[in-house]
Image (cartoon, rainbow, N blue to C red):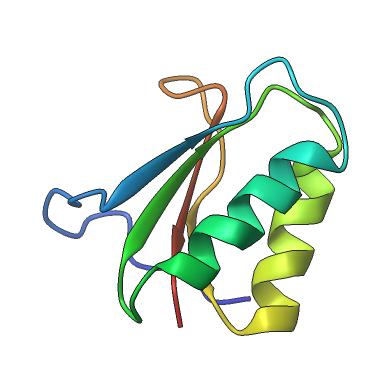
Amino acid sequence: MSQENSSAPELTVSSTVNGLGLSCPEPLMLLRKRVRESKSGDLIELLSDDPVSLRDVPAFCEFMHHALVSLPDAEHPHRFLIRKG
């Protein structure tokens, strides 16, 4: 799993997937569909409050060779950023 440098300049999100309120596997399925529709290098924001996403999204990125740019944190408690490989 590769993560981009957090000190990089402001990132421009290409699209957002709203998976808030959904449970496994729905957020990941929505992300997978959006990734398929996106171009290589696009930055996709996934909003998910499902705790299983903390395990599923990094595994998905590693398996599919996408860059996991960021995981949820105190500032963005439900946001994952994924750059399509």
User: What is the tally of numbered marks visible in this picture?
Assistant: 0
Above/below status of 58 relative to 24: below
Locate residue 40, reporting x and y percent.
Answer: 35, 81
Locate residue 49, reporting x and y percent.
Answer: 69, 22
Above/below status of 2 relative to 81: below
| Left or right side of 7 for 6 | right
In this view, the residue in front, 68 or 40, is: 40
Q: Is residue 47 visible?
A: yes
| Left or right side of 6 for 59 | right
Locate residue 60, reporting x and y percent.
Answer: 73, 67
In this view, the residue in front, 5 or 82, is: 82
| Quadrant in which residue 66 is drawn | bottom right
> Which residue, as the protein is rendered here, is positioned at the far left?
9
| Left or right side of 36 for 25 | right
Q: Is residue 3 visible?
A: no
Q: Residue at x 60, y 52 (%)?
A: 31
| Left or right side of 57 for 3 | left
The quarter of the image holding the N terminus is bottom right
| Quadrant in which residue 71 is drawn | top right
Q: Residue at x 20, y 52 (%)?
A: 11
Q: Residue at x 60, y 84 (%)?
A: 65
Locate residue 73, reporting x and y percent.
Answer: 52, 29
Above/below status of 78 relative to 31: above
